Image (cartoon, rainbow, N blue to C red):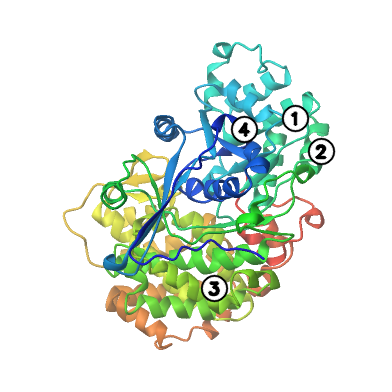
Amino acid sequence: TVLVTKFVMSGSVTRAPALVCDRGELSTGIVHFGVGGFHRSHQQAYLDELLRVDFENTKSWCYTGLGVLSFDTKMRDYLVANKFTYPVVSRTGETPETMAMHVHHVVTLRDMLLSFENPAAAVRLLSSPDVKIVSLTITEFGYRVPINEGDRTLVKLALDGAVDGAHNDEATPAECAGATVFGILLAALANRKRHGLRPFTIMSCDNLPHNGEVAKRRVLGAAADLDLDPATQQWLETEAKYPSTMVDRITPATSNEDIVSLKENADITDAWPVMCEPYKHWVIEDDFVDGARPAWETVGALLVPDVRPHELMKVRLLNVGHSAMCYAGVLAGCEHVHEAVTHKMIKPFLKRLMREEIAASLVADPSMEALVCGLDQYAELVLSRFKNVAVKDTLDRIAMDGSEKFRVQGRAVVMEGLAADRTVRGFALYVAAWAHFLRKAVMEGSVVRDASASLIVAPWADVAGVGPVESAVTATEYAVPARLPPQTAEDAAALQRFLDIEEVFGVLAQHEGWRQAVVREFEDIATSGVEATLLGYIFGVGHNSNGDLAQLGSNGARLSERVSGTFILDEVCAHEDAAAAPDITDEAVAFVSLY
C-alpha cells in the first residue's frame, strides 16, 4: 500500500517534536546541492519520517548540504545556529479563520559545506565511500551553467591525488572557489574512480521533465568539456545512475509574517522556518547504483520503473497551470495564488485549459491510481491545493523564470496540441498575458526576475525608451517612466519581436497560426481587458481557435511533420546520432539545452 502524507486539521496547532536520538549515530549517505526551502520541506521531510519509523536502517542515510553560491552562506549560518534542526510548518485552510498548522521538526540534515570556502573539502566529502547518492535542487538554470577554469583546475587536482586527506586546503588555487556544481561532481567522481570506488547515484529533484536524463546529459557533456579520458566517460555513462524523479510540495518563501505567526500560534521562535502545504508527493525511478537507497516507499514515496507519466501529469497540470494562471492573475489585480484560483474568471479559464488543452496531452498510467483515480481528479486536487490561503504563495514568485518554464514545461504541450489539431487558444492567452505582464513591468520599472530577463524584456524596453541596468544574474531593472503609456502601434511590433525569440518559443516562432492567435489575445487584453478576454475563452466565443492554427508553418511544412523524429531532438541538443538517443519520442522537446 502506498501512503500519501495527509494532515487532518481544523483550526488546531499540532506538533511533531524533533526525534529524540543520539545524533552522533547519524551519518551522511546523501549529499545535496541546493539546500533551500523546497529541499527542506520535501526530501528532508520524507527522510525524517523514515528515520522515525526505521532508525537503524535509515541512520546512515542522512544528508549533508553543499552550497556553491554566495547566498548559500545565509542558509549555512542559520542551520549552524539551529544545530542543524529546523521546523517544517504546514498550514491549510481556505479562510484565515479556519487555518490550521502542523509543525514537524527535522533532524536529518547533519551539516552543510560551502564549496567556495573549501573546494577540496567539498570533493573529499563527495569522494567518501559512505556517500551513495548526490541529489540536486539547482533549478533549471543550474543545468546550463558552463564549465569554467575553476572546474578544470579542481578536476586536475583530483586526478593528481591533490585533494585527499593530507592536502593543504589553503594551497588550493583561488580559481577553484568558482567551481560549478557539475565541475565539483566530476572532480569527486574522477577521484572515486582513481581510488577504485563505485560512482554515486546522481538524483535530480528539480521540476524538469526527464530530470534524470537531463542530469545525465549534463554530466556527460561536462565530462567531455573537461577532457576526462574515454574510460572515465564510459564509466560515467554505464556505471553511474541518474534516476528521474517527480517532486511536489508547494513551498513559498518564508516571510517575516510567517516567523511572527509561528511564534504567536505555536510558541516557536525560529529565524527561518519552512512554510508549506500539508500535501507532498514523490515519485522516484527505482534505478540506483548497486540498488543502494533509503526505503522511501515506507513513508509514501512511489518507486516505479518509469516516472514519465507521473512527471508529465504533475508538470503540465500543476506547474504549467501555475504559470498560465499567474500572469492573468497579476493583470486582474491579484497578489496570491489562492486569490487568482478563486477569481470569477481565472478559475473557469484554468479549469478549461486543464481539461481541454493540458489533460488532452496526457495518458493516465495505472500506477497513478495510488494517488488519484484519473487525470480529472488530479486536476481537481491541484485546484483545491491552489485554494489553500494558508500557503500564501505569491504570483510574483510563480512568475519568476517564466521564459525557462514555458520553454521546458509549456512549449511541448502547445506543439503537441498543434500537431494533433487540438485547440491551443488557452495557451495563446497565457502567452499574451505574459507579454502584457512583461510590458507592464518594464513600463512601471519593476524587476523582471528571469534568467533570460534581458532577452525577453528587450522588445518592451525598446518601446518604453528605457535602458536596462543589470543588477543580478536573474533580474533586470528599468528606470521608472513618469506614467504607464497607452498601447501603441509600437507594442504590436514589440510583441512580434517577443514571439521571434527562438530560445523561448523554438519552432513556434515560425508558426504563423500560433503567432496570430497570440496577437489576437494580446489585442483583446489591450482593448477589452483581461477579464473580458478570459470570458471569451471560457465560453469559446470571439475567435476560431482551431482552423487558423492548422495553417502551414513559414517553410511550408505542417507542424505535425516537424514535432517528431530528429528535428526536435536536434533543437534541444540531443546526441548527433538520433538513433542512439533515449526513447523519449515527442516529449524530447522538454529537455533543457545543455552546454
- Residue with the mark numbered 4: 27
Label 4 CA crowd tier, 10 Å (few <14, some 14–19, many 20+): many
Which of the two labelled residues, at mark 1 and mark 2, occupies the earlier sequence position?
1
Q: Camera-side residue: 162 or 310?
A: 310
- C-alpha gap between disc 2 and disc 4: 31 Å
The mark closer to the camera, 3 or 4, is: 4
- Residue with the mark numbered 2: 234
Task: Inspect the image, locate mark 3, and give the three-letter code of the amino acid beneath it.
Answer: Tyr
- Which residue corresponds to the image point at 47% horizontal and 80% vertical from the top-left? 352
- C-alpha gap between disc 3 and disc 4: 38 Å
Q: Where is residue 538 in the image (x, y as percent from the top left)?
A: 41, 84
Q: Quadrant of residue 436?
A: bottom left
Number of numbered tags placed on the structure image: 4
Task: Inspect the image, locate mark 1, and give the three-letter code of the amino acid beneath it.
Answer: Leu
Mark 3: which secondary structure? helix
User: In this rendering, would 289 be left or right of 122?
Assistant: right
| Callout 4 touching callout 1 (CB < 8 Å) | no
- Which residue corresponds to the image point at 52% horizontal and 51% vertical from the top-left? 42
Which numbered marker is on residue 378? 3
Q: Camera-side residue: 42 or 318?
A: 42
Mark 2: which secondary structure? helix
Label 3 CA crowd tier, 10 Å (few <14, some 14–19, many 20+): some
